[in-house]
Image (tube, rainbow, N blue to C red):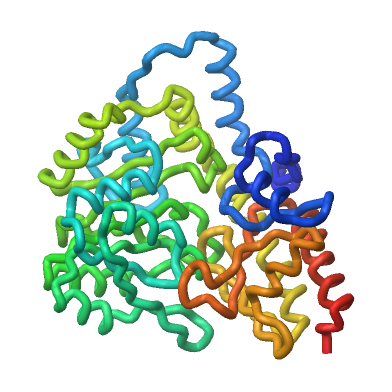
Amino acid sequence: MDKKWFKTLNRKHTDSIKWQRAQKECQNTECYTFSIADSDYETAPPIKEALLKRVKHGAFGYAGKGDDYEELIVEWYKKRYDVSISKSSIIPAPSVLNALSIAIDLSSDVGDGIIIQTPVYHVFKPVIEHNHREVIDNPLRIENDKYKMDLKGLEDLFKQGHKVFVLCNPHNPVGRVWTYETLKKLMEVAKKYDVLIISDEIHADIIMPDYHFTSMAEFFNDYDQIIVISAPTKVFNIAGLKIAQVIVENRQLNKSIKDMYIKLHLSTPNLLALTAIKAAYQDGEAWLEAQNRHIYGNYQYMKSFLEAYSFFKVFPLQGTYLSWIQFKHPDISASQFVKDLKAYGIFLSEGEKFGHGEDFLRASLACSKEQLKTGLEEMDKYLKNKDLVK
């Protein structure tokens, strides 16, 4: 079933931001995009079936969450991450970024520093700046071809008085799934200086073989200054339906966030989003596991293809469907390489926009094997036409 589920889906005329942007920037009638992080195949069949059934019903009036909303999330956390959370800790939100913005606004003051770890999801920076806060960088370090947290540097920033830290786990774009040991140390250092950890866990279920995801919810009993933000949207390609969840056991933080959503009249999710999340968490696990196998197969294929050339290095993929690729060629920069590929109809993300990624590019693997193969072949054609293969 895996191959049947992950066939190429034509999204060029479906108001897809990913494909609209690619078609606008690529100078080729045949365009293949591996940029924005959403997938180019159909969502899980149970989600599609649930939505079709709901639409067929025909009424789309005001809708409540229902008692099963929190129950399904609690069950998912226990089953997938072996973490027990309470139903009262769960707050529905329109999106992870919306929840992140509100968490930053409620936990800090104008002018405060908010710590991130670059290279990291590039939208963290504008979310912080739109809240009139200062971006404070604690860059990741590369050791033995693997990214690691600089916990000593992070503690120094905590000592300076910065009180909010945004974690990305699994980490976009470098593909790390932070270990229990690393996250425990992070929690202990944050606790020592009373620093709030806001953990973006939107990619939590996209985990490659032999790796295990640890949610920061694991440490709720050890430290109560933790906000976990997650969603089924990346995993099941339903971001356009707008739904996420904020999980906060700290009663004061929980109440503040709930009160803000009430104030904004955003405390009830979209009807179709509710339909989708319930179907995902109730019946989507088999599809999810098949997707992870598919993504890992794409990763292995890309790694083998690109590393036949000495100037490519594909970093290990532990989680997410985003491949972080180092490109070090004596005659052309990674940024120029990404720009030139547009003439060949290939649209990738430049590494430099994530911070400390000047020699890198990012490619989404959430596509069919055929689409990936075509993209790599066009890339290969460019390299040979430009005489960049030595």
Which of the pair 178/141 is nearer the observer? 141
80 on left or right of 322: left
Q: Name the image quarter holding residue 71.
A: top left
Question: Which quadrant: the C terminus?
Answer: bottom right
Front residue (pair 43, 361): 361
The percent position of residue 325, horizontal first and vertical second, equals 62, 74
Up-down: is 176 above or below 43? below
- Vertical placement of 32 versus 177: above or below? above
The image quarter containing residue 41 is: top right
For the N terminus, give its image quadrant.
top right
Q: Residue at x 33, y 81 (%)?
A: 150
Residue located at (15% from left, 60% from top): 223
- Residue 75, by quadrant, is top left
The residue at 14%/78% (across/down) is 159
Does residue 61 appear left or right of residue 334 in this picture? left
Residue 308: percent from left, percent from top: 77, 81
View extreme (right): residue = 385
Tell me if 381 is positioned left or right of 288 in this view.
Answer: right
Using the rendered image of the protein, determine whether residue 317 is visible from the camera's viewpoint: yes
Residue 121: horizontal and vertical position, in percent?
46, 61
Position of residue 263 measured from the top left corner of the image (x, y, whole percent) = 21, 30
Q: How many marks are shown on the rendered structure?
A: 0
- Is residue 282 something that shows in the picture? no
Where 352 falls versus 103 (above or below)? below
Say which residue appears at 27% left-offset and 39% top-offset.
90
Most foreground residue, 198 or 280: 198
